[in-house]
Each structure stands twice: as C-alpha cells, then as structure tokens.
Amino acid sequence: MTATLNQYEAVKFSRIYSLGAARGDLVVTNDDVAGPIDSSDEWIRQRTGIVTRRRASKDRSLMDMAVEASNEAIKNAGIDPQEIGAVIFSTITHPFQTPSAATLLADKIGANPAPAYDVSAACAGYCYGIAQADALVRSGMAKYVLVVGGEKLSDFIDPTDRSISFLLGDGAGAAIVGPSEIPGISPSVWGSDGSKWEAVSMTSSLLDFRDGSASWPTLHQEGQTVFRWAVWEMAKVAKQALEVAGVKAEDLSALVTHQANIRIIDELAKQLDLPESVVVAKDIINTGNTSAASIPLAMHDLLTSGAVKSGGLALEIGFGAGLAFGAQVVVLP
Amino acid sequence: MALSKDEVLAGLAELVNEETGLAADAVQLDKSFSEDLDIDSISMMTIVVNAEDKFGVKIPDEEVKNLITVADAVNYIADNQ
C-alpha cells in the first residue's frame, strides 16, 4: 500500500505587514563628492536630483543597518521573530562570498533556525524578495517572511568614477510578509536580460584583483543604455504589473520605483501617464541610490511622512544590474 | 514615403525643442549636441527614443555615441528610414 504524503496547505492571500528602515549615519553633500569628478552641486542636482546621499561610516556595517531595519519591521508587525519562516536578504555588497548575510541576520534578530538566504538581483532585489515571500507565504511554506534589501555601496565605489559612484548611498529596508484575509500582493512581473550583463557591473572580477591585474572592483554603468532600458522597457513592465494586478493607474496611491536617478523616475512616471493623485516617491533626493534598499526606504519614507496612507495601493518596481527587474502592486502596510 | 533631410532636420528640431526648450531654429546641421546645444547624455537618449517613434527608425545604443552633430543624426535617420 502506498503511503499518502502530507503537503503544505496553501493560504489564499498574503500582504506586507510592516516596514523598517535604516540609513547611513553620514549626510554626504554634492560638494563632498563633486571634486574628484570635476563637477558641482548644481550639475549633480540637475542631472540626478540628488541633494544629499546617506552613507555609513566605517563603524556602521551593512549588517548593523539590516538588523536595525529588521527589528523595526518585526516590532511594527507585532510578531515574535521565532514565527519567521524564512529570511531573504537582497544585497550585492555583503563582503563575504560565503556564508550568506541572511543567516547571520536571522540569528541576530532572533529568527534562528529559520531558513535564510541571500538574493543577488541588485536594484531589483527587493522586488525579487517580495515575489518569493509572497509565494512562500501563500504556499504555506512559511508563516512570516522577512525580506531585507540592504547595501553598503560606499565600500564599492570609486570617487573619480563619473558613471554611478556619486549617486550611491547606504541603507537597509525591511518588510514582514505574512498571511492575509484580502489580497495584498499582486502577481509579480519579474525577469532578466543578461544580454546587457555589462550595462551595470563591476570594473573587474575579484580574481583579477587577487592577481594584481586590476584595482579593487567598483561599480560602473553605461548610463545611456541603462536610461533607455530603465524608462522605456520598465514602463512596459510597470504597465504589465498593473494589468496582472487588475488595477489601473488611477487606483494607485503611490509609484515607488527603484531610486536610481530623478530623471529616470520622472520620465518613467511620465510614460505611465499617472494622474496627479498618485504620489511618486523621490527619496533619492535625500538618500541617494541605495540599490536593493531604495524601494523599502522610499516606501517607509512616504508612510512615515504621511504622504500616503496605509491601505492604499503602491506599484513598486525595481530594475538594475543583471539586467534584472521585478514589479508588483502591493497594499501599503 | 521617405522624408527629405530638410524634413528630418525640422522634425528633429521639434524633438530637441520639446526636450530642452531650445528654439528649433538653433538646431542646425553643423551644431554639436553636447558642445553647442548643451544637451546632456540623458536628454540625448530621450531625443533618440522619441526620434525612433517619430521617424520609424531604430537607433541602437552603440550608434548613439556616433551622433555628435545634428548632421550625424539627420544623416543616420534619413539613411535608415
């Protein structure tokens, strides 16, 4: 006689319960970064929208920021960290090949022995994490999932690089995803385009650095290629995300894009033809581009400043190195 | 029917005006986009994408860096219609 297996019992819906945020402790002005790139405050503001970026001092690690953001999210969700069934840490700046950042984070926040793993999807990492958390919760595989997007990008910049370094900041954003009575996370539109693998990448590999044939690897990008892809290709992805969510632009309270550059954000918003009632997140102005952290940080800022209310709908869309992209519509926690 | 180079220039000047506010008659064949017209790389890409729509041409990323002057762009568009 064949034994009958148990399988996970699915729950119908999931939602984001809460967010947490932590930023670099240093406020870095445009004047602070303009010298090595022969630029100015005015030039940087006009071309990027950035007024200051937040960076972490030597004593404030990626893990410090991730723990701070996670603890806030756990507290605001009102859950016991032992109920967390998975920890997903999206980052490209964890400075160890192994072990993962997620396992240490899980231990530090009291979620040990939850399964924990890192996601390497750069600026799309948070949306990749939410997509996976939604699936884990609805499948019944985890009751609550902690998703963190965190970066200490300042460890991987070249002050003389004019392509991306001066945009970058440090921070971590966290979300608790759990079961819900009503739909709180739409189907995700996510994907990649490895034919543009070099459009945002490192200046060299760690092996080249080890062999002395290259200096410390830092981030760089092909700005025009990225701009075209981030606006016009991502506009298609954003429209698709609205369609699969079954909502229209006028149903949104907020558009929370990856905070790459104000001109990408503005042009993308223009392509979506959003009504004025939709708040467009522009946390980049004071925080800079924090890669995987930028969407939860920007959403947290909109909620804490009162610009949007809990219960509204937000379209979140991340895009970056890979190239990789992810988008979904969520109910604001 | 393919547009003449004069017609492409006039259409391109409209796109430059929409993106930058620059008077259309300032967009002349011998002008450099970055040096003379002060158009930065992001505005240039916006103009390129809008030109693709307007003229029904494909302008690949690797071609954009070869479009130094207005004449470069007009010739590329006219030759690839």
Image (tube, rainbow, N blue to C red):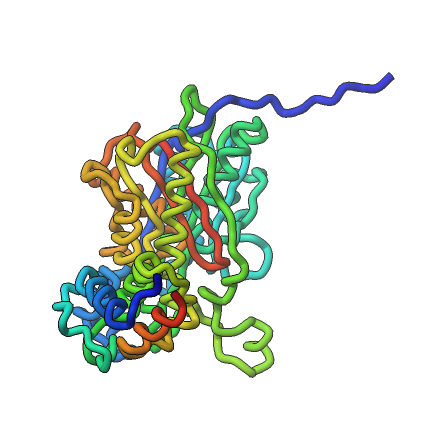
Give how far across and how far down residue A307 sits, in percent: 20, 38
The number of numbered badges drawn on the structure is: 0
Quick check: can you spot residue A229?
A: yes
Instruction: Give me the residue at 43% from left, 71% from top.
Output: B62
Q: Nearer the viewer, residue A116 or A16?
A: A16
Q: Which quarter of the picture shows residue B40? A: bottom left
Q: Along the horizontal axis of the image, is A174 left or right of A54?
A: right
Q: Along the horizontal axis of the image, is A302 left or right of A77?
A: left
Instruction: Give me the residue at 46% from left, 65% from top.
Output: A199
Quick check: can you spot residue A29?
A: no
Q: Nearer the viewer, residue A169 or B56?
A: B56
Looking at the rendered image, the quarter that the C terminus of chain A falls into is top left
Residue sticking out furthest to the right: A1
In the rendered image, the vertical position of residue A333 relative to residue A104, given as above or below: above
Q: Along the horizontal axis of the image, is A251 left or right of A223?
A: left
In the rendered image, the vertical position of residue A189 relative to residue B60, given as above or below: above
Give how far across and how far down residue A151 sits, in percent: 41, 56
Give how far across and how far down residue A11 sits, in percent: 53, 22
Instruction: Give me the residue at 24% from left, 32% from top.
Output: A309
In the rendered image, the vertical position of residue A314 relative to residue A108, given as above or below: above
Residue sticking out furthest to the front: B1
Give how far across and how far down residue A277 sits, in percent: 20, 36
In the rendered image, the vertical position of residue A198 relative to residue A65, given as above or below: below
